[in-house]
């Protein structure tokens, strides 16, 4: 029997597949992940749809707009709307990324890396507490794919995550593809990264495709999971055990059957 | 605070808005990728992401202007307009401000209004049942507030006809106007209602807070009111409260 946090194997709910989920209710998908930001301002028709799907699928909320790392104040309206949506869909958990998306009132709509320093920890820890208090639940943070590192970091990314978990109780969404992409781009040891993440903090695994530009990898979510990512996923499971796992596919979205086949590969491992 | 400075420097470079202090970034992997090239990955992505978001909301304008002119317009918009909201869906709405007056601006304004109405807050519609039991005198003094998710528009050209033809996939030609429209979200769908000029005038007055009596300023409008009122209530033109 799966534990409460190991929901099984899920997919991201994307608009081309709304009709299939609503009409066919495929049992090959154990749970759904929604992009929180696409729904918190959406009209009631979308909320009705999510509540309808919630009767058959646990829903996990995954955001891109929290900007936990920025030095701008946290957006109280955003947090309030996020909580309202989480309550409405009875979200199994709420995640976003360890990053900043903007600063001084401007937004890049990208997941920009932060420096992994003591000063950054001191900045983030009270903000994570503030978010968790506003949401009334644990915040789960994902490792983003990155293309640049700050010089002078005193902690590795995995060590930074471990400190955040220890000092705030936040969870970790371990994106295996992102570990692979960032490790390639920065010359990190991907298995060493996996080893350094605290098992108890890991709530979920993400798998996705990326694009190989030769001298760097780019996180595109538009292709099947690559072989090295499958291997790293197997390694992560051997170190940390099974967790709720989902396939992210956000561009050039294929037919549902393609995603279902990709999910079958996860289930068969 | 070093942390804030580090973030500001990365943000400037990652959005292509300024040069960063390169000493802040790590030359890793044996300098295979220079820090500047790494920052360019972000800057290129920033421009492509915002341009794609804008282009997705103006398909008819793109067809009307042609790819080259439209791409130049979108690039100019992204260059001139930093995003100031976490919701990327709202970013494209300001594009019409960059278009010179004329049919293209009318079409841009129409497509922007459709996006704005789609993302506007919910409100309950006023229905015929809500008016039952109200006597004639009270009815005449009532105010009617347009739906929160609505835009009242008037154009010199005929962008709505163009948009309809474009969406149908046939040849679209921009005709002469004027056109008067109410864009309203009702029953979770965005609808475009063509309005009579007089009807547009009455709805404008109502949206400015005039009572029904004051808004119905002419005999012609009074004659048309029963017909309009039925349509307004059926299609959810007004907020319930």
Image (cartoon, coloured by chain):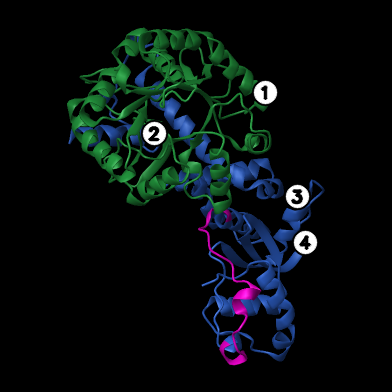
Residue B182: which quarter of the image? bottom right
Q: Depth check: A269 or B51 in front?
A: A269
Q: Please, is residue B228 above or below residue B45 in the view?
A: below
Residue farthest toward the right in the current orientation of the protein: B170
Q: Please, is residue B117 above or below residue A236 in the view?
A: below
Disc 2/disc 1 C-alpha distance (Å) = 28 Å
Residue B134: which quarter of the image? bottom right
Instruction: Pick whichever of labels 2 and 1 is earlier in the sequence.
Output: 2
Specify whether residue B197 is in view: no
Q: Depth check: A89 or B137 in front?
A: A89
- What colour is chain A? green
Task: Please state the chain letter of the residue tagged with numbered disc 2 in the rendered image.
Answer: A
Q: Please, is residue A8 above or below residue B115 in the view?
A: above
Expressed as whole percent of the image width and height from the top left, the position of residue A150 reads 28, 23
**Which tag is nearer the camera, tag 2 or tag 4?**
2
Q: Are marks 1 and 4 in contact (CB under 8 Å)?
A: no
Which residue sits at x=36%, y=14%?
Answer: A186
- What colour is chain B? blue
Which residue sits at x=56%, y=67%?
Answer: B147
Q: Are marks 2 and 4 in contact (CB under 8 Å)?
A: no
The segment highlighted magenta reads B118-138
In the image: residue A42, left or right of residue A118: right
């Amino acid at each position: 029997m799966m534990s409460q946090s190991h929901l099984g194997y899920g997919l991201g709910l994307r608009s081309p597949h709304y009709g299939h989920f609503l009409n066919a209710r495929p049992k090959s998908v154990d749970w759904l992940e929604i992009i929180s930001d696409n729904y918190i301002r959406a009209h009631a028709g979308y909320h009705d749809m999510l509540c309808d799907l919630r009767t058959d699928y646990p829903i996990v909320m995954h955001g891109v707009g929290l900007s936990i790392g920025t030095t701008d104040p946290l957006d109280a309206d955003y947090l309030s709307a996020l909580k309202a949506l989480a309550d409405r869909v009875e979200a199994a958990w709420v995640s976003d990324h360890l990053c900043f998306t903007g600063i001084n009132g401007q937004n890049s709509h990208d997941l920009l890396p932060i420096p992994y320093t003591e000063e950054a920890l001191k900045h983030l820890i009270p903000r994570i507490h503030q978010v968790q208090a506003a949401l009334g639940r644990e915040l789960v943070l994902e490792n983003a794919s990155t293309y640049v590192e700050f010089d002078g970091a005193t902690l590795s990314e995995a060590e930074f995550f471990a400190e955040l978990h220890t000092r705030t109780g936040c969870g970790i969404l371990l994106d295996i593809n992102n570990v692979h992409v960032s490790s390639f781009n920065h010359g990190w040891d991907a298995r060493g990264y996996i080893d350094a993440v605290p098992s108890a903090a890991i709530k979920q695994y993400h798998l996705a495709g990326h694009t190989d530009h030769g001298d760097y990898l780019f996180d595109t979510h538009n292709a099947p999971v690559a072989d090295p990512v499958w291997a790293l996923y197997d390694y992560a499971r051997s170190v940390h055990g099974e967790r709720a796992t989902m396939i992210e596919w956000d561009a050039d979205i294929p037919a549902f059957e393609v995603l279902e086949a990709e999910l079958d590969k996860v289930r068969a491992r | 605070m070093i942390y804030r400075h580090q973030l500001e420097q990365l943000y400037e470079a990652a959005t292509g808005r300024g040069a960063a202090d390169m000493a802040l970034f790590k030359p890793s992997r044996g300098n295979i990728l220079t820090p500047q090239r790494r920052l360019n990955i972000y800057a290129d992505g920033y421009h492509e992401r915002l341009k794609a978001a804008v282009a997705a909301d103006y398909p008819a304008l793109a067809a009307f202007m042609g790819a080259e002119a439209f791409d130049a317009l979108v690039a100019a918009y992204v260059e001139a307009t930093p995003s100031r909201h976490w919701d990327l869906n709202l970013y494209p709405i300001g594009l019409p401000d960059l278009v010179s007056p004329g049919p293209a601006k009318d079409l841009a304004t129409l497509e922007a209004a459709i996006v704005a109405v789609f993302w506007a807050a919910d409100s309950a519609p006023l229905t015929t049942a809500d008016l039952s039991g109200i006597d004639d005198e009270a009815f005449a003094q009532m105010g009617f507030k347009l739906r929160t998710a609505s835009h009242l528009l008037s154009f010199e050209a005929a962008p709505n006809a163009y948009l309809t033809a474009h969406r149908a996939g046939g040849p679209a030609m921009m005709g002469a106007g004027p056109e008067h429209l109410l864009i309203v979200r009702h029953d979770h769908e965005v609808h475009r209602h063509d309005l009579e000029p007089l009807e547009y005038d009455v709805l404008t007055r109502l949206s400015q807070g005039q009572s029904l009596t004051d808004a119905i300023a002419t005999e012609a409008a009074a004659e048309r009111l029963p017909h309009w009122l039925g349509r307004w209530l059926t299609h959810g033109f007004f907020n319930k409260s």
